[in-house]
Image (cartoon, rainbow, N blue to C red):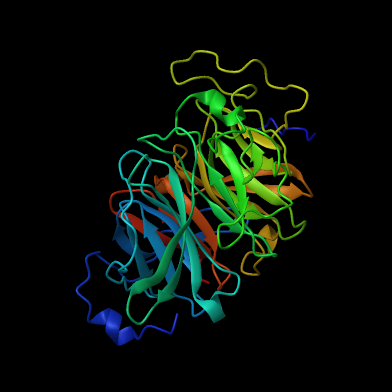
């Protein structure tokens, strides 16, 4: 048990994009005044704007980006900010509250098979669905779209986040929120609410999942006792799967995920209800995992990326997450599986940061969560 840190694609021709009737306002990069940081002054450049609540970003092999918008659109964005029309073939999600088209992940062999995976809220029932598709970049559409998994359990109109991370063996880890529903469902192995699941790329269940063959337990479950996971990534230094989730009013967590482990929601935690009422029995209990970091008050962390690039040498090995309520970018310094420090960046940007990714250029790329959201590139000032 860990100790918490309280201190807490064939290439699309440029001419095609330029002649499209764009439904999203785009903008060329324009530098703002530098922002201070431990790595020196930062430039924050707007690459594209006018995206409606963008949720997830993934880099294609040629440097273009795939971006999802929560109302149900997926677009291709070039490095210089040209935004395509919405891709055809994307299933229509249920929208409203936090529901809609959510995370996106490219298959590890995407360059060869053009396969990607994405999460969306089912139009019937409000549960999360995971789909697999192939990208036809020239035709601006998804082909061979197939829903490979549908969350089982009480649905919810508001939903919660859904993130996808693919392991080196090809299996998919997917976070499923508790839907603001009956909280105890996160402890109920008979439903997928408040769980992190593991499925094969075709949606089948790997036979070595921890609850395979157990009565009244769903075989796709990998870990449980989660609330609203908004970040999921493998730590390249250790190979371990890390997760970030929202608490209610306080108690946001960074967790290292273990097979079959219970992460405590709602039995233990460090937050309170939105009303101010007590939720948890305590902050710790035998058989339930502790976070390696938590935030009180809440910052509402979202998206996460381990930094391995060379553009910011001082930040190699750091973990970055956006913050929605906190309206900032957060850098966590790490020593193995321990958080040794926290740096709060871009606070004067006054933007809700939904996703953060390391780009192929070594810069940090951010999505802002707004009705006219932006793609931002963060790099050393003047670099």
Picture quarter with the N terminus: top right
Q: Is residue 29 visible?
A: no
Which is more toward the observer, 230 or 349?
230
Kindly identify the residue that appears in the image at 78 percent across and 35 percent down: 2
Residue 375 sits in quarter: bottom left
Vertical order, 153 against 266 (above or below) = below
Q: Can residue 69 be seen in this view?
A: yes
Residue 30 lies left or right of residue 202; in this view the side is: left
Residue 168 lies left or right of residue 249; in this view the side is: right
Kindly identify the residue that appears in the image at 55 percent across and 57 percent down: 203
Residue 334 lies left or right of residue 151; in this view the side is: right
Horizontal and vertical percent for residue 346?
48, 49
Residue farthest top in this picture: 277
Residue 237 lies left or right of residue 135; in this view the side is: right
- Tally of numbered discs: 0
Which is more toward the observer, 76 or 325?
76
Residue farthest left in this picture: 21
Which is more toward the observer, 65 or 109?
109
Horizontal and vertical percent for residue 46?
37, 63
Kindly identify the residue that appears in the image at 49 percent across and 80 percent down: 62
Horizontal and vertical percent for residue 284?
72, 22
Vertical order, 326 against 275 (above or below) = below
Horizontal and vertical percent for residue 222?
67, 44
């Amino acid at each position: 048990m860990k100790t918490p840190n309280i201190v807490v694609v064939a290439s699309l021709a440029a001419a095609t994009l330029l002649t499209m009737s764009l439904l999203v306002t785009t903008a060329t990069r324009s530098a703002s005044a530098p922002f201070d940081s431990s790595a020196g002054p930062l430039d924050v450049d707007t690459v594209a704007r006018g995206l409606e609540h963008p949720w997830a970003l993934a880099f294609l092999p040629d440097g273009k980006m795939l971006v999802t918008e929560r109302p149900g659109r997926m677009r291709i964005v070039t490095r210089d900010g040209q935004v395509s029309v919405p891709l055809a073939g994307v299933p229509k999600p249920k929208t409203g509250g936090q529901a809609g088209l959510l995370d996106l992940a490219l298959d590890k062999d995407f360059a060869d098979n053009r396969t990607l995976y994405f999460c969306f809220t089912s139009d019937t029932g409000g549960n999360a669905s995971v789909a697999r598709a192939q990208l036809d970049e020239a035709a601006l559409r998804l082909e061979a779209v197939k829903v490979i998994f549908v969350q089982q359990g009480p649905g919810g109109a508001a939903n919660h986040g859904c993130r996808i991370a693919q392991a080196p063996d090809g299996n998919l880890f997917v976070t499923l929120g508790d839907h603001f529903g009956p909280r105890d469902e996160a402890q109920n192995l008979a439903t997928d609410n408040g769980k992190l699941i593991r499925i094969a790329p075709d949606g089948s269940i790997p036979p070595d999942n921890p609850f395979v063959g157990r009565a009244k337990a769903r075989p796709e479950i990998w870990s449980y006792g989660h609330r609203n996971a908004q970040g999921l990534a493998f730590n390249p230094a250790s190979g371990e799967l890390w997760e970030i989730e929202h608490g209610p009013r306080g108690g946001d967590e960074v967790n290292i995920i273990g097979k079959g482990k219970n992460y405590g929601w709602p039995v233990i935690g460090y937050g309170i209800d939105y009303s101010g009422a007590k939720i948890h029995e305590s902050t710790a209990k035998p058989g339930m995992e502790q976070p390696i970091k938590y935030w009180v008050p809440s910052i509402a962390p979202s998206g996460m990326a381990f930094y391995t690039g060379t553009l910011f040498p001082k930040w190699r090995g750091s973990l970055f997450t956006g913050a929605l309520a906190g309206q900032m970018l957060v850098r966590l310094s790490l020593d193995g599986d321990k958080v040794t420090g926290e740096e709060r960046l871009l606070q004067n940007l006054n933007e809700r940061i939904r996703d953060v990714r390391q780009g192929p250029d070594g810069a940090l790329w951010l999505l802002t969560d707004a009705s006219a959201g932006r793609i931002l590139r963060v790099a050393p000032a003047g670099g």
